């Protein structure tokens, strides 16, 4: 997958490009990642990339011309452009899986008070990573790219199959050695070696965690008969 990032602060991606997951993806040719400095596409010796908004208002607005020039330099017929924006649709694990099928992703990272509205017309979609405001779109772009890179084979597939949100539920609790520490013991079922009992315990604890921490996820979950029975057991235990 080719990924192009359009930003006015390319230095913010220096450490990101050397992060283990991203670096491994590039070394294995799973990801071809390029960072484009929008300032290189601004005209004039001062390379102005922002200006005050028409009609007045606080702050500076990212100009459309340098952004469009940068976008045109990487755009091809198979590109899918994402604008990171608090006005976009909330990002989900399901969307991460869908984006993995794209050949070329272009990320538009906004900054300052906002951007010229004509820039928004370049985007195929707007994505939000949460209902809060950041100083720029660089961190959301990193978040989305990291979530995609994990699914492209940069880590073992078995490591992602049972994670939170993969099956519509939160992940079950996990433990490692020692079996007992400071008076707190690992659940006996995990030490039993009984695969079926362990599987059922993990499923039940996954349901329990989801009910306690993210009950909203259960509203759209397609329950199996076993999950429904386990959820009823949990609710009775809570009474």
Image: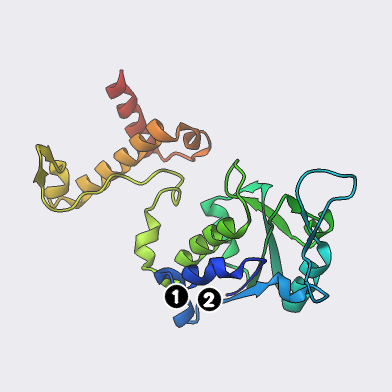
Left or right side of 52 for 228: left
Callout in the foreground (2, 1): 1
Left or right side of 185 for 175: right
| Image point (77%, 65%), residue name | 49
| Image point (71%, 56%), residue name | 125
| Image point (49%, 40%), residue name | 222
- Give the quadrant of the C terminus: top left
Q: Which mark is residue 31?
A: 2
- Give the quadrant of the N terminus: bottom right
Residue 208 picture location, percent across and down: 34, 34
Image vertical order of residue 56 relative to residue 74, above or below: above
Q: Residues within 10 Å of mark 2 (few under 14, many from 20)?
A: many
Disc 1, SS: helix
Q: Residues within 10 Å of mark 1 (few under 14, many from 20)?
A: some
In this view, the residue in front, 193 or 59, is 59
Residue projecting furthest to the right: 55
Residue 22 picture location, percent across and down: 46, 71
Residue 32 picture quarter: bottom right
Residue projecting furthest to the front: 46
Q: What color scheme is it?
A: rainbow
In this view, the residue in front, 63 or 99, is 63
Disc 2, SS: loop
Query: Is residue 76 in view from this perspective?
Result: no
Rounded to the nearest angstrom, the CA distance separating label 2 from label 1 is: 9 Å
Left or right side of 35 for 174: left
Read off the residue under disc 1. 23
Q: Which mark is residue 108?
A: none
- The tag earlier along the polypeptide, 2 or 1, is 1
Residue 15 picture location, percent across and down: 47, 69
Residue 77 picture location, percent across and down: 76, 75
Query: Is residue 181 in view from this perspective?
Result: yes
């Amino acid at each position: 997958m080719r990924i192009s990032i359009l930003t006015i602060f390319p230095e913010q991606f220096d450490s990101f490009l050397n992060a283990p997951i991203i670096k491994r993806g590039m070394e294995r040719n799973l990801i071809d990642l390029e960072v484009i400095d929008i300032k290189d596409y601004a005209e004039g010796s001062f390379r102005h990339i922002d200006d005050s908004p028409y009609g007045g208002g606080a702050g500076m607005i990212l100009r459309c011309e340098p952004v469009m020039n940068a976008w045109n330099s990487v755009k091809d017929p198979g590109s899918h452009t994402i604008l990171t924006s608090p006005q976009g649709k909330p990002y989900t694990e399901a969307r991460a899986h869908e984006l993995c099928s794209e050949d070329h992703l272009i990320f538009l990272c906004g900054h300052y008070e906002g951007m010229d509205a004509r820039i928004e017309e370049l985007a195929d979609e707007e994505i939000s990573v949460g209902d809060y405001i950041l100083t720029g779109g660089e961190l959301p772009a990193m978040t989305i790219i990291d979530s995609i890179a994990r699914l492209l084979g940069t880590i073992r597939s078995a490591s992602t199959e049972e994670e939170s949100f993969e099956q519509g539920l939160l992940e079950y609790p996990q433990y490692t050695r020692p079996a007992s520490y400071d008076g707190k013991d690992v659940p006996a079922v995990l030490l039993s070696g009984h695969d079926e009992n362990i599987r059922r315990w993990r499923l039940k604890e996954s349901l329990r965690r989801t009910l306690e921490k993210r009950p909203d996820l259960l509203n759209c979950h397609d329950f199996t008969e076993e999950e429904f029975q386990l959820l009823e057991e949990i609710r009775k235990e809570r009474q």
